[in-house]
Amino acid sequence: MASVSSILEDIDDKFCQCCLCFRQYKDPRQLPCLHRYCSECLREIIDTTKDKFKCPLCQESVVIPENGAEGLKKDFFMNEILEYVQVRSSLKDKQLHQCGDCSKQVKATAYCFKCSDFLCKDCHDYHMTRKSLQEHRPHLLTLTDIESRNITLEKLSSLKEAPRCQAHLHNVSYLCCKTCGNLPICIACTYGSHREHEIEDVSCLAESERGRLKQRVKSLKDCKDGVYELREAMRTISGEIQAHAEGTIEKLNHKFEARVEAYEAKQRQISDDVVREKDEIKKTYSRRKSALDEEMEEKIQQIRKEYEGKQIETDHELGNLISDKDARYANKTQELTTKHELLKNRLEVVRQVIDQEKDDKTEESKRVSEHIEGTISRFENLTATSANILESNNNWTAVQNVEAICQAAEPLEVDMKREFPDVGKLSEFPESEGLLRRFVGVQNVVMSEEEESVLEVGRLIPGDVKCIEGITSTTGGDIVISGDSDHSGSGVHITVINITGERIKQHVVNSTGGYWCYCTIFRLHEVAIAFQDTIGIYDTRGDTYRSKVFSQVINKLSGNLRCVANDDVSNNIIVGCYGDQDLYVLSDQLELVDTLRLPDGLSRPVGIAVSDDNIIVCDLGPNKAYVVNRNGELVHTFTKPTGDNCGKPWSVCTDRNGYIYILWKKDIYYRRDHSCIVVQYHPEDHSLLSERSSKADVSSMATALIGNIEKLLIAHHKGGQINVYTLKEE
């Protein structure tokens, strides 16, 4: 809102103009944020909304009074300005008005604020000379006063007469009833309906209110520099987001083209080698055949039958060798073609990840910028309104407006002091080399022999039992754990920590009837949560949670949710229920997309993970871990670990290069011996690579990318510990 000039003659027409109808205010009403609009304009907005509406200028929410626009505060200050503007216009334009004294229709030369009427020249002179009208003289405004351009807010305040008592219309109000919202009253009211109310003299109350307003404005101005600097920083970051995203994709495109060229060169080399080897074989067997021909000529009669047999045998061997070479060439060609297509598909996933992150960062930047712009708009409006009230030096203006300004200033000061520590990271994107390695893979991944560290997070988990049933990690490197919050079945916790074990945030979901809670990373900073008959998504950045009843999603009763995995290719969630042969594929809106039936005998899944086009399933029915394809067909059965009789597959995860990690637990389920083995398997032939033993009561595993180094996280079921192993790429 623009500040009104101290010289009222310099008032801009826009100051008295409603920003909705672009006409002069009619019955202006003031919102709690101090922006003002015509009552009719507000009525049109209120008629289209329920309970609340947003200020068109600063987007602050306003609760709608029971009686609609009529319940909003009348703008006492603006009404004074409007009355002056109308009087000034009439006098300057010499408009015809009915004189308030003689009732003649003449050009008015003065206006009496005490009479609230225009005066002709004769009646004005009469006012100035008549002793009985002596009290009217300080309230007279003439054309000469206006043309002298010296009418200030303070002068206008002196022209205006104190308001009349609403109960005793002939009495001037010199007192305020604070109990009734600073209502103007006269002395007679103090003996009547306001007898036991809190009463103050308007001058004393106005002076107190001005002091309070000055202190509040000073406090807001102390925050001004930080808010304006943050607005400039957000404008810079918004530009950097687009530039950095485009730069990252350009680097990926260059690396993708280089990798494709390498595959094509390798394919050409294999083709040349096969042709050369086939030629060598043909030459070798041609020489052998010639030797046989010579021998046949010498002993043609004796060895004809033997020769014919050897010739057939030689031709057959030659055909087999050539067919073998052709098959090997075809397999190698198919393998390279498959890798080429997989690389292309995974590059598209990388692009989608970057595009999604760019969209999320752009949306977050827009949200922060809009909040800051709204805060600045409210600050400028409040300081301008405060300056006007203070400059007018009108007691009643101060009494009627300062309370509303101070109420608006309290939440404004909170918003101005609000910090956005993560806005500087909005323009950061992951290095293209790290993303490419994540989706293309490396030759070998080795798990460290010993644990790198142990995170003690029990103090961060609510309740006495300190349960961890699920663990995963976000794209930004944060770790998310989930489990029972108090072991009574009344709630589950979702806790976000960093790699040093410090809690970032925690969310508790009320529940009944069980306490197993599992989680998996879904998209960037979103985590899919599964427990009992509930499936949900928790946003670790916005600290929001949404969920649905799972049996209603699949439209049938099923067992308790026991495992959940993310398919980052289709951006869907896959969940399994204990006692159910089907796996269920859900969209990001938690709607059923597809159903995958497992092979016969598999109906107790306790762990699942997605590996390229296959799904890895840990099943307690046969106590085995399997690879099945998207059609539910069995592809491979994993080899169990050796030693310690650890035969129950309990949890499974994969790293960014596709290597598979399965947690095998002791066959004897309810003994105190919690021996377990973590086994690493090859991503292509699924062969057993390495084993790590533990005596701890381990419940779940996940991988986390910390910087450019991938870690394997192994969570204890009780006690609040997480073992950290390093996955070294060679």
Image (tube, rainbow, N blue to C red):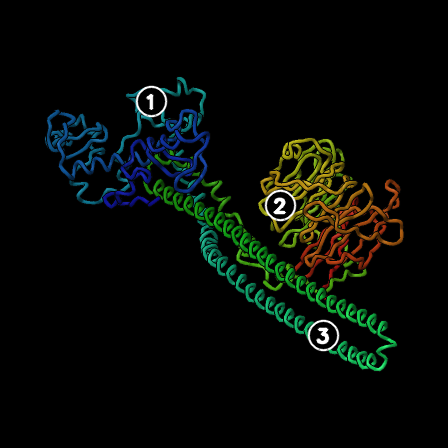
Horizontal relation, residue 645 to residue 314: left or right: right
Could you say which disc has been placed on residue 572 in the image? Answer: 2
Spatial separation of the CA atoms under disc 1 and disc 3: 112 Å
Please tell me whether residue 294 is drawn above or below residue 589 in the rendered image: below
Q: Which residue is mark 3?
A: 277
Label 1 – label 2 distance at C-alpha: 68 Å
Q: Quadrant of residue 545?
A: top right
Tag in front: 1 or 3: 3
- Mark 1 is on which residue type? Gln
Q: Earlier in the sequence, mark 3 or mark 2?
A: 3
> Which mark identifies residue 99?
none
Left or right of 329 on screen, residue 180: left
Gap between marks 3 and 2 measured at Cα: 47 Å
Is residue 398 placed above or below 270 in the rendered structure? above
Residue 193 is situated, as x and y percent measured from the top left of the image, at 41, 18
Q: Is residue 208 visible in this depiction of the protein?
A: no
Residue at 66 percent of width and 62 percent of height: 334
Residue 12 image position (x, y, % from top left): 26, 45
Between residues 296 and 207, which one lies in front from this camera angle? 296
User: Callout 2: helix, strand or loop?
Assistant: strand
What quarter of the picture does the N terminus occupy? Answer: top left
